Image (spheres, rainbow, N blue to C red):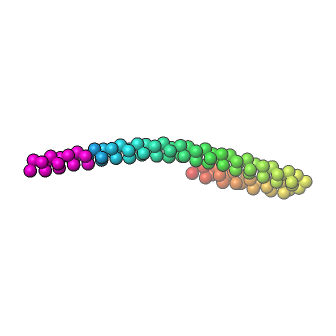
Amino acid sequence: MANENIEIVNNLQDKIMRLVERYERMRSDNEKLKMQNDQLTTQLEGSAREMADLKEKYNTLKFSKTIEASSGDVHFAKIKINQIVREIDKCIALLNR
């Protein structure tokens, strides 16, 4: 009977040790994944900022080309500027909400 109890205790100790080792590995893996997640989040935010900057540059270039192409047509340029001003006013109104 005593041998059986000792064997049970030894088995429990082995299982506990394996669980502790597994826990430590999982904790380590979790930390690595958290760091990787932070790096990818930072990279994604940087890409989003770069994309927003490029969109802004594209829109500016598109606007300047529109004005340049229609420099002979002052009336069309005034209409285009008025449209842009209205769009800016809408954006400001949305920001003020």
Query: At 54% from the left edge and 46% from the top edge, which residue is drawn?
Result: 40
Where does residue 35 sit, x and y in percent of width and height? 48, 42
Residue 30 horizontal side relative to residue 58, left or right: left
Residue 74 visible in the displayed image: no
Residue furthest right in the image: 72
The residue nearer to you, when weighing 22 against 52, is 22
57 horizontally vs 96: left or right: right
At 26% across and 48% down in the image, what residue appears?
Answer: 15
Q: Give percent across and percent down for residue 37.
A: 50, 46
Residue for point 33% across, 44% down: 21
**Front-most of residues 23 and 88:** 23
Residue at the farthest front position:
3
Left or right: 84 in relation to 97: right
Question: In the rendered image of this protein, does residue 79 appear above or below residue 34?
Answer: below
> Does the magenta portion include 3?
yes
Instruction: Estimate the x, y position of residue 51 in percent, counting from the top left.
Output: 66, 49
Q: Is residue 63 left or right of residue 51?
A: right
Q: Which residues are magenta?
A: 1-15
The majority secondary structure of the magenta stretch comes to: helix
In this rendered view, identify the residue nearer to me: 23 or 63. 23
Q: Residue furthest left?
A: 1
How many labels, in total?
Answer: 0
Residue at image point 15% right, 46% down: 6
Q: Position of residue 83 (x, y in %)?
A: 75, 56
Q: Looking at the image, can residue 19 be seen?
A: yes
The foreground one among 3 and 63 is 3
